[in-house]
Image (cartoon, rainbow, N blue to C red):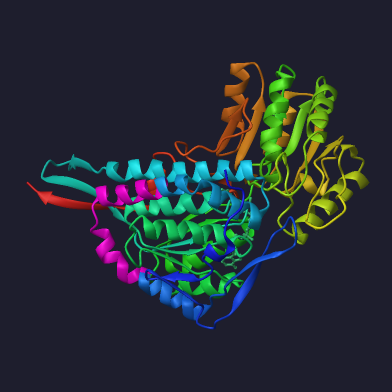
Amino acid sequence: MSTSFDPTSLHTELFIDGAWQQATSSAAFPVENPATNEIIAHVADGGPADAALAIEAAGRAQTEWSKSTPRERADILRRAFELVIANTDRLAAIMTAEMGKPLAEARGEVAYGADMLRWFSEEAVRIGGDCATSVDGNTRIMITKEPIGPCVLVTPWNFPLAMGARKIAPAVAAGCTMVFKPAALTPLTSLALVEIFREAGLPDGVLNVVTTSKASSVVDPWMSKGIARKVSFTGSTEVGKTLLRQAADNVMRSSMELGGNAPFIVLADANIEKAVEGALKAKMRNMGEACTAANRFFVHRSVVEEFSEKFAKTISELQVGNGVLAGTDVGPLIDRKGLEKVESLVADAVSKGARVLTGGSRPEGPGYFYSPTVLVDVALDSELMSTEIFGPVAAITPFDSEDEVLRLANDTEWGLVGYLFTESLDKGMQFSAELEVGMVGLNTGLVSNPAAPFGGVKQSGLGREGGKVGIEEFLEYKYTALAV
Ligand code: NAD
């Protein structure tokens, strides 16, 4: 198993109309390894002129691509799936270098992203339609589904492969062309994925990628040119709102996978071992840099001490370090800004009475590392209760009644996911119905699955990725009236 990649094999250019090319301005921006602060590569810094070339290519390619058969699209996705699996070590090594997650987690992400490609290769050939008779019996109503048209895809840095795969796969399956802007902090994994699609036989112009250090200089023209018919965004709620305003101006379909503020609830009757295991996954996966990360732990007062101590012990045993080293459980945060945000959220919680059971500091040396941390007695007015922590910090608050915890859990503008640990199926079902979220982890700390509709309610977003409904986000209905 290889744990590194050949830096000279990296793609660092824009990919437009089937060709790798430099930015029109010839500018490039650096990509940093967050574990070592070394520069891994310089990547083409696209701007408005490149954006125009990319969206025009997507517009031109749409007509032919709409006529491709479902089987052709399924076969391309299937080949891409196989190539991603065959390149697991290389993709994981690139991801660890630019994003920091431990190699084992990076391999897990490659498997998840690949599964998205496989899932949508299977969905591409199942795009159905419908048929009905008009109420007066005089017309046959034929309903078909068509690709919505060129799509704008924008992704974040925290899951560089999976977030791209989760958008590209349903768009390919539906027959849409795309312009894609990956996050500036982690463009290399996305560019490697794009090369895989080229090798898998995706026609020129169907997938166009522009990397840039100035997101709006590329995405604004895509949103305003009148060619794109849809935007699919994963990232912060703030940027999502900006894109929604731009989408309104052009009446574009929108899918938004935005921020979260997940409650992790441990009821009095929970199996504490299971809850600790679930908490470890829900909090520490991806160094806590996940929209699905447990952000607020509410634990029944009768078990809060037992849960907190066991969780703190488990967390204190995690190995922090460079993700390429064997035995590393927790890598660095993505950048200085992310690290400083976590430090300031912990300082604020402590100033309001929280106690640090473990962690609470950053280790010496290079890289943006922060020690896995458990805080107890966290006051409800602490900033981290209403802000995505995006770091390896668990904030625990006790509760006394189930009504109270439901109210606390729902007291947020976000509604992506909620976790509940209980041995009572009745209570599980009741909480599942009453939590204002798009997804519930019942006795599990992991919800992502290609077969499941991923997404949130409230300010966590619009639309779903994955599952049976995932492809619908990229399809439009057409109804033909047939006189009989
Ligand atoms: P971000 O919103 O800062 O950036 C996301 C993407 O948007 C990046 O590619 C960025 O370059 C681009 N962008 C930034 N400003 C833009 C603008 N004005 N116009 C167009 N594009 C712009 O988010 P981030 O820091 O990269 O990612 C973390 C956020 O993503 C968190 O809030 C997290 O919860 C969220 N997220 C959500 C999901 C989900 O599925 N719900 C999954 C992963 C991450």
The part of the image, by quadrant, that contains residue 27 is bottom right
Q: In this view, does 162 lie to the left or right of 382?
A: left
Q: In this view, does 468 lie to the left or right of 218?
A: left
- Judged from the image, the quadrant occupied by ligand 1 is bottom right
- Whole-percent x, y for residue 26 in the image: 55, 82
Task: Determine the residue positioned at 75% across, 62% down.
Answer: 37
Task: Determine the residue positioned at 51% across, 67% down.
Answer: 246
- Whole-percent x, y for residue 415 in the image: 61, 42
- Whole-percent x, y for residue 5 in the image: 58, 56
117 or 348, which is in the foreground? Answer: 117
The part of the image, by quadrant, that contains residue 216 is bottom right
Q: Where, quadrant-wise, is the N terminus in this rendering?
A: top right
Which residue appears farthest toward the left when viewing the image? 484
215 or 34, which is in the foreground? Answer: 34
Q: Is residue 75 magenta?
A: yes
Q: Is residue 232 magenta?
A: no
Does 48 appear above or below 124? below
Does 117 appear above or below 443? below
83 or 120, which is in the foreground? Answer: 83
Task: Determine the residue positioned at 76% across, 47% down.
Answer: 321
Q: Is residue 465 visible?
A: no
Magenta: main secondary structure equals helix
- Whole-percent x, y for residue 265 in the image: 71, 29
Magenta stretch?
58-81
Q: Is residue 356 left or right of residue 245?
A: right
The part of the image, by quadrant, that contains residue 269 is top right
Does 205 appear above or below 411? below
Q: Can residue 21 be seen in this view?
A: yes
